[in-house]
Image (cartoon, helix red, strand yellow):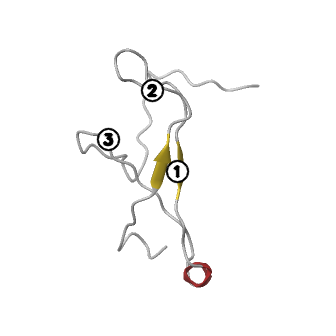
Amino acid sequence: MDGGETWKVCKLEHPEKPNKYGKYWCWCFWSLEVEVLDLFGAKEIAVRAWDLANNTQPENLNWNLMVRVNIRS
């Protein structure tokens, strides 16, 4: 809410159980309680995720032409 200057830890929920290899193949849901007054000055809300090895999502998506995309025409 402040352009990425500060970050808060959210609550993460997995609606399904992991497979026998510990992998999830479904969406996960996150939630965070914030004060309504904090939203008034926010121009955007940014979220960021890390995995157990501290890998994070890139700020900008790099397209890979080898990846097949499910696009409806």
Mark 3 Cα-neighbour bin, 10 Å: few <14, some 14–19, many ≥20: few
Mark 2 Cα-neighbour bin, 10 Å: few <14, some 14–19, many ≥20: some
Q: Which residue is mark 3?
A: 51
Residue 51 higher or lower than 38, as above or below: above
Q: Mark 1 near mark 3, Cβ–Cβ under 8 Å?
A: no
State the image coordinates of residue 5 (x, y, percent, origin top left): 35, 74
Q: Mark 1 near mark 2, Cβ–Cβ under 8 Å?
A: no
Residue 45 higher or lower than 31, as above or below: below
Asked which secondary structure carries label 2, the reply is: loop
Asked which secondary structure carries label 3, the reply is: loop
State the image coordinates of residue 12 (x, y, percent, origin top left): 47, 48
Which residue lies at the image location 54% right of the left edge and 72% below the top edge?
Answer: 34
Q: Mark 3 near mark 2, Cβ–Cβ under 8 Å?
A: no
Q: Quadrant of residue 54?
A: top left
**Left or right: residue 73 compared with residue 50:** right
In three-dimensional space, the C-alpha distance between marks 3 and 2, rounded to whole angstroms, equals 12 Å
In three-dimensional space, the C-alpha distance between marks 1 and 2, rounded to whole angstroms, equals 15 Å
Along the viewing direction, whichever of 66 and 49 lies nearer the viewer = 49
Residue at the far left in the pictured view: 53
**Left or right: residue 38 compared with residue 22:** right
Along the viewing direction, whichever of 22 and 1 lies nearer the viewer = 22
Along the viewing direction, whichever of 39 and 22 lies nearer the viewer = 22
In three-dimensional space, the C-alpha distance between marks 1 and 3, rounded to whole angstroms, equals 14 Å
Which residue lies at the image location 44% right of the left edge and 21% below the top edge?
Answer: 66
Q: Which residue is mark 2?
A: 24
Identify the amino acid type marked 2.
Tyr
**Left or right: residue 68 compared with residue 21:** right
Q: Which residue is mark 1?
A: 30
Identify the amino acid type marked 3.
Asp
Q: Tell me the quadrant of the picture where the C terminus can be found.
A: top right
Which residue lies at the image location 49% right of the left edge and 24% below the top edge?
Answer: 25
